[in-house]
Image (cartoon, coloured by chain):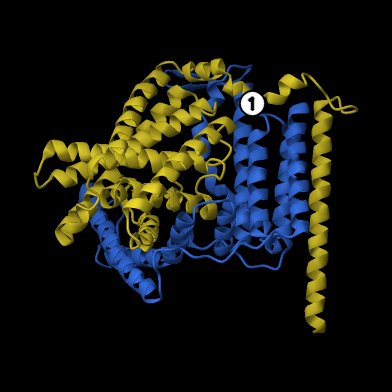
Chain colours: A blue, B yellow
Amino acid sequence: MTHAHFLDPYRPRASLIHALDPRVKFLLAVGFILAAALTPPAAWAAYILLAALALAATVLSELGVGYVLRRSGLALPFVLAAFPVLFTLDGAALLHFRLGPLVLTLSDAGLVRFVSIALKSWLSVQAAIVLAGTTPFPELLLAMRSLRIPRLLVAIIGLMWRYLFVLADEALRLMRARAARSAAAAEPGRRVGGTVAWRARVTGGMAGNLFLRSFDRADRIYNAMAARGYDGEVRMLPIPRVPLGQRVLVGLALAGLALVVLLGYLL
Amino acid sequence: MFLSVQPMHIPDGFLSVAVSVLLWLLSVAAIAYALQRVNRELGERQVPLMGVLAACIFAGQMLNFSVTGGTSGHLMGAAIATILLGPWAAIIVMTAVVSVQALIFQDGGLLALGANLFNMGVIGVTVSYFAYHTLRRLTGDKPWSIIVSGFVAAWLSIFIASLAVALQLAVSGTSPANVAVAAMGGVHALIGIGEGLITAGALAFLLATRRDLVGAGAPRGESSRTVWLGGLAIAALLAVLAPLASAHPDGLEWVAEQSGFLDRAQGPLYNIIPDYLLPGVSNEALSTILAGIIGLLIVAGVTLAVGQSRRRRASEGETK
């Protein structure tokens, strides 16, 4: 009973991207996503350049192109939200569909907008995957701190990450216990178990139990922290400076991305 | 785990830059204020508690029950966090959850994170708080009061947040308002029932085992009146805006165009350099092909370089 959703996406490698400062990686990823968002619809040349950059970063990171592409399918279901745009924008009609009493007209403007949105989203997800795949979580916390995110929030996010896997295991135990005590019918279609409301009530009880265990665990954690001298002040190591070479790299890369966006408008 | 990507998390690429930035600013302001309140009102004991509860909500989203034919109901958690922790701590907890979902698991985008924080953190929590405590006051000390209020608060938090998502998509020009509001609202009216049932079940369990925990998030004087009013305002605003937007699908875009921020978002350079073409590259198809060639060169170069360095590393490993 594994759960892919909770696997730490960080993959240790010896690549150039792994060696970059986490703040540099963070800025570059956000800069890339911003560039994709700023590029106008139907700027195919700019999209190709952005896709090449994303692919180059993937190859450089040695995460494996297949891995990144597989994971990037994750955000795909949301494309449904942009689906109606296909039929509602004015433009030259390409196709007609008959859906009961409704006649849907696929317009070229709608198609262009839809494909642009899907492409931008897909490229942005790739950048985020490379960032998460090459940066261990403590380094991301460091990047957060240098972005002036308040220490309290960073400390809470750090604690959350520390106990996420513990509580995920706790949740899996609860689910395994439920599965062990539940019947399953051999022939499909035969109803087993209670009504949907009853099943939801049981799941609610499990969620409540998870909360209860979390409260208890938080008490123990606080006691342990207090035993080691915790007094409410969150203390952290000073933040090291970003090396000069990497600063230059960020400047160049962001200028390059700005150029791609500019090309998107000019062409 | 097809449904592990919830339709509530907006990925990057779906919101216009103007909408993303505006919602980032709103979220940052709300979170900063919540942090200040948490710092003032809660003791040092609360720091590990909030971290662990954020992890708990994250893990709690794994708990699901089958509804029918492969679909399942599961938890977003804003309502239960609000009821157990109070509004300010709940906003912080939801901020931690939604940020890590975006940063690590690509559940929702990074540029769109401001919007997701706003929808699930700020709106989810304020609406839950408003609904829960209004109903608690109305129903008094009846034994079922907490459970029913919890159900309604959870359902409403999902439903209202989904309306906000739909409106944001509509203003961004990603989805026409009349379709987006109806589709998102309709889907989440159903998803919200799952959320409501799980929340009610959790509250029933906690009432039976640890009654003291359930009263912990109760309102304390004027400090929580702001949140109550905020929840009322959000619920009222969206209740008016959403039907309006769906009746006049172009209404929102019209407003956006009039106030000029769609233009600013989509074509600032267009106005400065109209119909400008790169010297020597006059044909659109040609420029696309050129971009393709440049892209190929970049990728091929990088691939070769990485292959080289790998081979060198491998041979170094052999000689050692």
Q: Which residue is mark 1?
A: B266
Chain letter of disc 1 in the image: B
Please state if B24 lies on the left or on the right of A134 as rendered. left
> x%, y% of residue A188?
31, 54
| Residue ID at (83%, 65%) | B308
Task: Say what amino acid the circle numbered 1 marks.
Answer: Gln
Compared to A85, does A22 lie above or below?
A: below
| Residue ID at (82%, 72%) | B312
SS category of the residue bearing label 1? helix
**So how many labels did they put on this image?**
1
> x%, y% of residue B318?
80, 81
- Quadrant in the picture for residue A181: bottom left
- Quadrant in the picture for residue A177: bottom left
Tag 1: Cα neighbours inside 10 Å, few (<14), some, or many (≥20)? some
Residue B148 seen in the current view: yes
> x%, y% of residue A261?
73, 35
Please state if A166 lies on the left or on the right of A191 as rendered. right
Quadrant placement of the C terminus of chain B: bottom right
User: Looking at the image, which residue sits at the far left?
Assistant: B142
> x%, y% of residue A101?
42, 18
- Quadrant in the picture for residue A220: bottom left
